[in-house]
Image: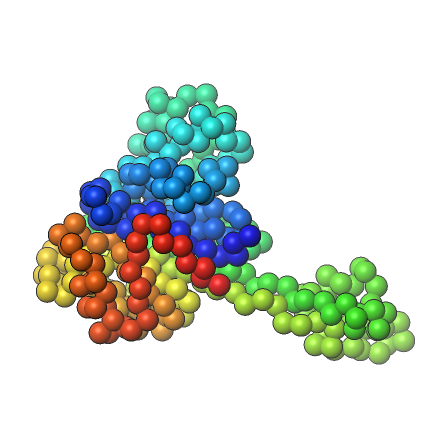
Amino acid sequence: MANFRLNILGCGSATCTLRHLPSCQVLDIRDSLYMIDCGEGAQLQMRRMRLKFSRLNHIFISHLHGDHVFGLPGLISTMALLQKGGTLTVHIFKDGAEQFGRLLDYFCRDMPFEVKFNIIGRSDDVVYENDAIEVRTFPLFHRVPAVGFKFTEKPKLRHIKPEMAEFHGVPHYAMSALRRGEDFVKPDGTVVANEILTSPADKCTSYAYCSDTVRNDRVAESVRGVEWLYHEATYDSAFAAKAVARGHSTSADAAEIAKLAGVKKLIIGHFSNQYVDDNILLDDARRVFPSTILANEGLQIDLL
């Protein structure tokens, strides 16, 4: 079982090329799949990476440019043909829900599952949560309204020490309280400290996704302290003016945001098709933030 694994399905910008596909990622968190953006080729990459369509129930769309959404109709159509059950929730801006709702009504009638649209905005909001994770949006600064997504694991339960629980006569009904960190009180009033009966909970992690955006310190504030950061790096520093004009960041910009935010690891992607060698971008970023790695199609990273 994957506890918290990142799968890169596409990390190019604007168009499909022979080297890169447009933006798409899938987080595998405790065997539930969460897709972030859905560029062309998403469903094919899911097959190549052996990611099960049946486990995908949430898709998060950062903004309404084609290279981040054109894979959505085909993916949903295929999921319908495969007789996926349950519900698929697409977290998307209002305009996108209206456009894709009409598209699905025309091309994907009588689907065996329900497609719900959760309308998001540019504010800092919790857009989804369950027992395991919380997902927040935060504003990005592109040519159209855009948001990033921050996935944060919720605190996990402590582990019971069976031999100590048995020694102190802890009844079964008290185990849940122990896992939550509470002390155990014996019938005679004796308090047994939780640390005696349990060991620490497993570590939690966090991941932030920053798609198309110019460099902005407010993004660093939004992702401050996350373990892993993905930040677009469309150009290297030599094309800084071009990046700003098109609403994008350079690899050095991404590295500066990572440094300001105090993240542990930076992943850069959304590479312009003008590059034959992406290491130009990697070297540019590592001069500012050494703990940087390149995204690439098929790359899988265990974030925990």
Q: Where is residue 31 in the image (x, y as percent from the top left)?
A: 53, 48
Residue 45 horizontal/vertical position (percent): 36, 41
Asked if 273 appears above or below 293 in the picture, the reply is above
Q: For residue 88, say whether it is visible.
A: yes
Relative to 115, is 1 on the left or the right?
right
Q: Nearer the viewer, residue 8 or 73?
A: 8
Q: Which of 269 and 101 is in front in this view?
A: 269
Residue 91 showing in the rendered view: no
Query: In front: 270, or 184?
Result: 270
Q: Is residue 164 left or right of residue 17?
A: right
Q: How many callouts does the rendering have?
A: 0
The image quadrant of residue 72 is top left
Measuring 42% from the left and 67% from the top, which residue is drawn there?
Answer: 227
Residue at image location 40% in from the left, 32% down from the top: 76
Where residue 225 appears, as percent x and y from the top left, is 40, 70
Indicate how the structure is coloured in the image. rainbow
Vertical side of 100 occupied by 225: above or below: below
At 90% from the left and 76% from the top, the residue drawn is: 188
Residue 139 higher or lower than 187, as above or below: above
| Residue found at x 30% / y 32% | 99
Q: Where residue 129 appears, x then y in whole percent?
A: 51, 52
